Amino acid sequence: MKRIDSTALTGVSETSLWTLRNRAVEATRPDSAFEDPLAIEVFDRIECDWGKFGKPSQSHPLRALAFDHAVWQYLATHRHATVVALGEGLQTSYWRLGRRDVRWLSVDLEPVLRVRKSLLPHEDSVVEIASSALDRGWMDEVDPRGGVVITAEGLLMYFDREEALALIADCARRFPGGHFIFDSIPMWFRNRTLDGLKMSDRYTVPPMPFAFSYSEASALVNVMPGIGAVDDIVLPPGRGAWKSPILRRVARMPTVRDLRPSITRLRFA
Ligand SMILES: C[S@@+](CC[C@H](N)C(=O)[O-])C[C@H]1O[C@@H](n2cnc3c(N)ncnc32)[C@H](O)[C@@H]1O
């Protein structure tokens, strides 16, 4: 089968290859609980110097599972909801979730959607929107009647703080009763990316200017209209150190919580 050249993906769009590689490598491991045959297929069809992304990490497959679970929870109570995946990259959540009937909007920049379309199966209920998530036009494509769950997985950290918070505020205003799930990085990690964080001698992670702690997220109920509740979502257990119950308990401690990356669910009032 024809292989796809990855060089069209540059800047932040190139990071969709990094996260895909980590999910696909995890999914091939016999000792992993992460299942994603489509990610393996897509990974195998892309021509890329994968080694430039350094050592594979479980962080991305575990993050994907955490997002899947949060979306699944929303769909369990909103059978006719629309899922909006902002900055979806080469994610295969739609197929992992197996809810073929759900209307799914995939919003990303044009070069990524072109690669996505050439590698992933066509589905009638998936609509691709080639646009910046910051351009609010995608909101007009959402039918909010059955509920809306919006994901921003590996996206907001690449925005400026004002841009990211204004996007959340507009979603809260536009989609009452909806959920918004996003992940964020702590300040120390933001600073490392601004200094030029290298995954290898051939790849430097793009700057991630937006750091946001769980404490800041939980304060949104008081400062941002339309935010009804805020949940901290802890990664599911992985392999080795990622399975350790002690480390998982430590991750929940208030003093540590603000120093680690987080996944946050906002429930719109
Ligand atoms: C780290 S990747 C995450 C991809 C996917 N969500 C995942 O978890 O594998 C970041 C993605 O955000 C997309 N992106 C960057 N800026 C964007 C913007 N302004 N609007 C929409 N997508 C954007 C990139 O093209 C890329 O696909």
Image (cartoon, rainbow, N blue to C red):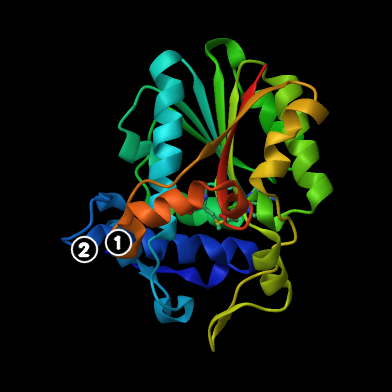
- Cβ–Cβ under 8 Å for marks 1 and 2: yes
The residue at the point 79 percent across, 50 percent down is 161
- Toward the left, the furthest residue is 30
Q: Is residue 267 visible?
A: yes
**Quadrant housing the N terminus:** bottom left
Residue 98 image point, x, y percent: 30, 32
Tell me which residue sits at (67%, 71%) in the image. Answer: 193
Task: Say which quadrant the C terminus sits in.
Answer: top right
Q: Position of residue 115 (x, y in %)?
A: 48, 57
Q: Nearer the viewer, residue 267 or 149?
A: 267
Tag 2: amino acid: Arg
Q: Residues within 10 Å of mark 2 (few under 14, many from 20)?
A: few
Q: Quadrant of residue 225?
A: top right
Q: Amino acid at mark 1?
A: Glu
**Would you name the residue on which mark 1 appears?**
26
Measuring 61% from the left and 52% from the top, which residue is drawn there?
A: 255
Residue carrying label 2 = 29
Q: Is residue 70 left or right of residue 138?
A: left
Q: Position of residue 20 (x, y in %)?
A: 42, 60
- Kindly state the secondary structure of the residue where label 1 is placed: helix
List x then y, in percent, for residue 26. 30, 61
Alpha-carbon span between mark 1 and mark 2: 5 Å
Residue under the point 56% across and 66% down: 14
